[in-house]
Image (cartoon, rainbow, N blue to C red):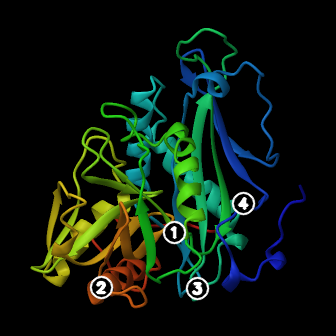
Amino acid sequence: MAKAQPSDFDWSKLGFGYHDLPYRYRAYYKDGKWSQGGLEEDSYLQVSEAAQAFHYGQEVFEGLKAYRRKDGGVNVFRPDMNAKRINTSADRLKMPHVPEEMFLDAVKQVVKANQDFVPPYGTGATLYLRPFYFGTTPMVGVHPADAYTFEIFATPVGAYYPGGLTPTSYVTSDYDRAAHGGTGAAKVAGNYGSSLLPGDIAHKGGYSDAVYLDPRLHENIEELGGANFFGITKDGRFQTPKSPSILPSITKFSLLELSKEFGLIPEQTTISIYDLDKFSEAGAMGTAAVISPVGSITHHGHKHVFYSETEVGPYTTKLYNRLTAIQFGDEKGPDGWVVDVPLK
């Protein structure tokens, strides 16, 4: 695959896809310690056919973005939260921690090295960063690896959902995203692999994605495809599901905080699929999706419409505008949320 060039892109028409950029960061874990990591140009990895990750799934990953500011500089949004979460995921799979300082330095190195691929301010596009690491020890028995490869690569992206800030429809799935007491709260590859079939079923039915219910009762909302769910009640509460088997979204925690600026009461609570009438607006939220309005949810043939199937609700619009204004540096947010990346 040929390396991408900045001239290859129409920044205002980017999809959410992979492009082979010039540089990525890698570090290697062996004998109980991490190597001195650094930038590499080869986008292909050479590992054993018996690498633990291929057979027993020891792999964790993250997602975050770099944003071009109006003054030409570049921000990353709350990378310290990603550094912490990747290690929480690693704990679940018995993997060694990535030092937070190494993680944060690697993020800055990758952005700086690929700075020509951070899309221009005003296009709405961003540079997506994918940190991940996985077990590379060759094995056929089931036990943790003792060698790992850590990498961060980057790719310029547009909206995760092609419609952008446009309401879309969802349908509940009979499949579980994760088991109770399983890996649902960890960002591991297996959670997403298991979502491919129910996601495909939803897409073929004309829906944007699937709604996953709790694995015990199949009654309470857990997640929407690859994003967390939120609903805004008619009495002014910003509610999002509370469950031990959903991913602790960085965007979710950010919006819980920002919702207070608009007079909303933030709550993490149980949300029954049979109690959707209390919401005036609803949406999906995550690093990739940012905020994607939910126009409707269909459950067992019954379709519930929120604010509108064609128009975005007022609170959803305010939250989206406030969050993206912070990320792109147009407005000041809470201390520490935005990190400047030195480009020289």
Q: Is residue 118 above or below residue 148?
A: below
Give, as a three-letter code, the residue at label 3. Tyr
The answer to which image quadrant residue 244 occupies is top left
Of the residues tagged 1 and 4, which is closer to the observer? 1
Residue closer to the observer: 259 or 270:
270
Give, as a three-letter code, the residue at label 2. Tyr
Q: CA distance from mark 1 to mark 4?
A: 21 Å
Disc 1 target residue: 208
Of the residues tagged 3 and 1, which is closer to the observer? 1
Residue 59 visible in rendering: yes
Identity of the residue drawn at 70% across and 60% down: 113
User: Quick one: SS at disc 1?
Assistant: loop
Give, as a three-letter code, the residue at label 4. Tyr
Identity of the residue drawn at 70% across and 64% down: 114
Identity of the residue drawn at 31% across and 87% down: 313
**Residue lying farthest to the right in this orientation:** 2
Residue closer to the observer: 260 or 103:
260
In which quadrant of the rendered image does the N terminus lie? bottom right
Disc 3 target residue: 121
Q: Reading the chain from its start, which is encountered first: label 2 or label 3?
A: 3
Within 10 Å of disc 4 (Cα), the crowding (few <14, some 14-19, many 20+) is few
Disc 2 target residue: 307
Dot label at residue 293: none
Dot label at residue 18: 4
Q: CA distance from mark 2 to mark 3?
A: 31 Å
**Residue lying farthest to the top in this orientation:** 141
Identity of the residue drawn at 78% across and 58% down: 20
Where's residue 177, x and y in %?
A: 42, 44
Where's residue 168, x and y in %?
A: 46, 77
Q: CA distance from mark 2 to mark 1?
A: 17 Å
Residue closer to the observer: 307 or 289:
307
